[in-house]
Amino acid sequence: MSDSPLASFLLPQGFARPHLVSLLHEARIVGEVGRYAVRTCEERRSRHARTSGDRAAAGADPVLLIPGFLAGDATLSAMSSSLRQRGFRTYRSHILANVGCTLESVDALEGRLEALAERRGSRVQIVGHSLGGMIARGLAARRPDLVSGIVTMGSPMLAPAAHHRVLSWGVDALVQLSRVGLPGLMSAECVAGPCARQSFDESREPLAPGVGFTAIYSRRDGIVDWRACIDPIAVPVEVTASHCGMAVDPRVIDAVTEAPFANSAGAERLSRIA
């Protein structure tokens, strides 16, 4: 960890940072975007998504989408559109770029959850990509009264620092900018101090019974160690997408749609999983 600004406890023994060559897997996103475009055209022609989706999502709780590190709500717009076509009510996190303190993000999103739960009269489902999934995990542990279930996509919850070195360079740049006074960015405390420890510990807290948890991962992930994405209390779902491509690959969107919390009948399935 000497070349990383993150604390050593964020990379427990048994996990590793992907090699440089693994980044080549991310080139698969070109095909995944193409696959999404083809699927979208097919669904528009047949209108199958809306017909079957309305039945599948009948009675579903609202869905909050949280983007990954350095990303914003726009990166999950394709997934949001597909979920809406299938009958889900989706909502943005209001994150333009996920570059700030994780604990502050959790605090802000807790308020967002409270507003959505009051507005819709139900608990909220959360879908998080990469760092967004780790934030979702912390929110679900902190507020089970507001969260009915979560789906994480390529989120290295067991070892947040088990990621490619290019991300460490991004973290280091944010820390340096924070040191010179630029507000709203991760500081050294956020990645290596008490703030980092608290955030990590909160993301490892047990979830309350009745809170669904699906962890989507890919062995072809070129950004994070896929083993760190499989939380032992989650329902694991393996896909063949790249890390970035999880936000658009229709096979991943299918997995999100089919997560145990996806419809009102999911309550019974959740109790069996728990």
Image (spheres, rainbow, N blue to C red):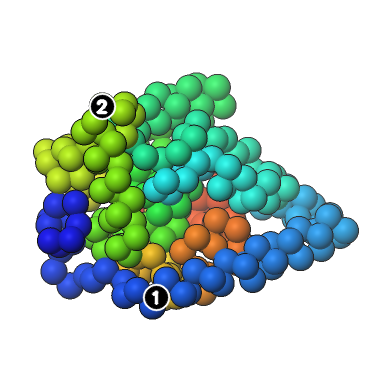
- Is 214 positioned to the left or the right of 83 in the image? left
Amino acid at circle 2: Gly
Crowding around mark 2 (Cα neighbors within 10 Å: few <14, some 14 to 19, many 20+) is few
Q: Position of residue 243 (x, y in %)?
A: 46, 64
Kindly identify which numbered label has been placed on residue 181.
2
Residue at figure coordinates x 81%, y 60% from the top left: 41
Q: Nearer the viewer, residue 169 or 214?
A: 169
Amino acid at circle 1: Ser
Comes first in the chain, label 2 or label 1: 1
Residue at figure coordinates x 54%, y 40% from the top left: 73
Kindly identify which numbered label has been placed on residue 271.
none
Q: Secondary structure at mark 2?
A: loop
Give the residue at the far right of this rendering: 45
Disc nearest the viewer among 2 and 1: 2
- Is 272 positioned to the left or the right of 161 in the image? right
The N terminus lies in quadrant = bottom left
Q: Give the Cα distance between marks 2 and 1.
A: 35 Å
Q: Position of residue 184 (x, y in %)?
A: 33, 29
Image height of 98 relative to 166, above or below:
above
